[in-house]
Image (tube, rainbow, N blue to C red):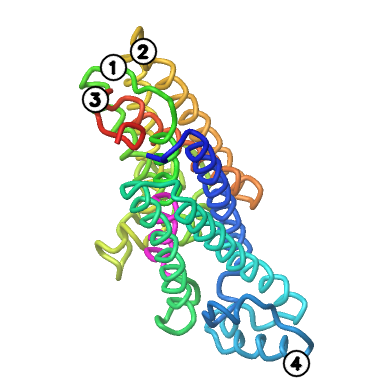
Amino acid sequence: MAKSDSANTWIRRWLVVIGLMVYAMILIGGMTRLTDSGLSITEWNVISGALPPLGADAWAEEFRKYQQTAEFQQQNYNMTMGEFQYIYWWEWGHRLFGRLIGLVAMGGLAVFLIRRWVGRTLALRLVVLILLGGLQGAIGWWMVASGIGETDRIDVAPYRLMTHFMLALVIIGYTVWLWLDLGRGRRVDTPALLRMAAVLIFALVFVQMASGALVAGLDAGRSYTDWPLMAGEAFPSDYVEPGLGLRSLFEGRAATQFNHRSLAYILWAVSLGALFLARGKPAARDFAILATLVTLQAAWGIMTLMNTAPLELAIIHQALGVVVFIAAVRLVWITRSPRAPGLASS
């Protein structure tokens, strides 16, 4: 734990800033994907890349590099300099904001260490948080590399996009957990069955978000826009695509969307079932909050799908999904045994 109440307050405020920045980063990343901007910068320069192209010659050079990619040659070959600059600014802003998060994270930890506000246990956990952020930058480049020559794709590999997004969720979830551990909130005495239900809901939310990332990476949300059927079928006949086989689970548009829909039904049913079991228990309100969020997210997802996933609806769907994930993290924390160790008691 922090070594004083004042230090504890400032560290929690810093964690709130980190959490909000990561949340904003997720949304900026979503906008970068939805505007097809992710491959506009073909190099990863941690320091020099913080500056945008300065002058016409620099812009021409960046455009020339982009013109060597399969995405330009096969899809955007008619792109003008103005159109390139639009997607470039999205990707540059995405990377710049990631650098800003790193500076805020490392700067805050440096201040806490200099002031001796943190003990060894908390310091190690904060270092883990920063290392996760550094890993996220490396995975981001690994993702981009799949679309600029490392593979034969004209966009990023869906499984790499999924990995990038899942790590972002791990980071924001870990931040929320630290914030809760440092707070004065109390865990409630919850029956073992409800504790398991909270963990199950959390796991389902995490897997559902992963499946959503695959749908997004394949642009599968625009492939089947009727509901509750898919192209008039209860089970899509092209669930397993020729040439993909079992890879259809990760690379097939029909399979990934069907899985995403099915997981949503399961998550919704489990959240309502857990709410029923929690009635009259101290954590009933928390289960109700999560069940409400899951229901709202499911309804919004259906509306987004049936409107062919326009940018505005799609980004709100992603934003609400992260809120559901945070609520699931909080539910697991609250329903843990009151005797479970935490930073506040360490």
Label 1: which residue?
A: 189
Q: Position of residue 34 (x, y in %)?
A: 60, 60
- Residue 77, percent from left and from top: 65, 83
Q: CA distance from mark 4 to mark 2?
A: 65 Å
Q: Does the magenta segment cover residue 13?
A: no
Q: CA distance from mark 1 to mark 3?
A: 9 Å
Is residue 257 found left or right of 69 in the rendered image?
Answer: left
Residue 262: image tag: none
Residue tagged 2: 282
Mark 1 → mark 4, Cα distance in angstroms: 65 Å
Q: Residues within 10 Å of mark 2 (few under 14, many from 20)?
A: some
Q: Quadrant of the C terminus?
A: top left
Which segment did they paint magenta?
Answer: 157-170
Q: Amino acid at mark 4?
A: Asp
**Which residue reaches farthest top?**
280
| Figure check: 43 above or below 294 | below
Q: Are marks 1 and 2 in contact (CB under 8 Å)?
A: yes
Residue 192, position as x, y percentages in the image: 20, 21
User: Which tag is nearer the camera, tag 1 or tag 4?
Assistant: 1
* Mark 2 residue type: Pro
What secondary structure is the stretch in magenta mostly built from? helix
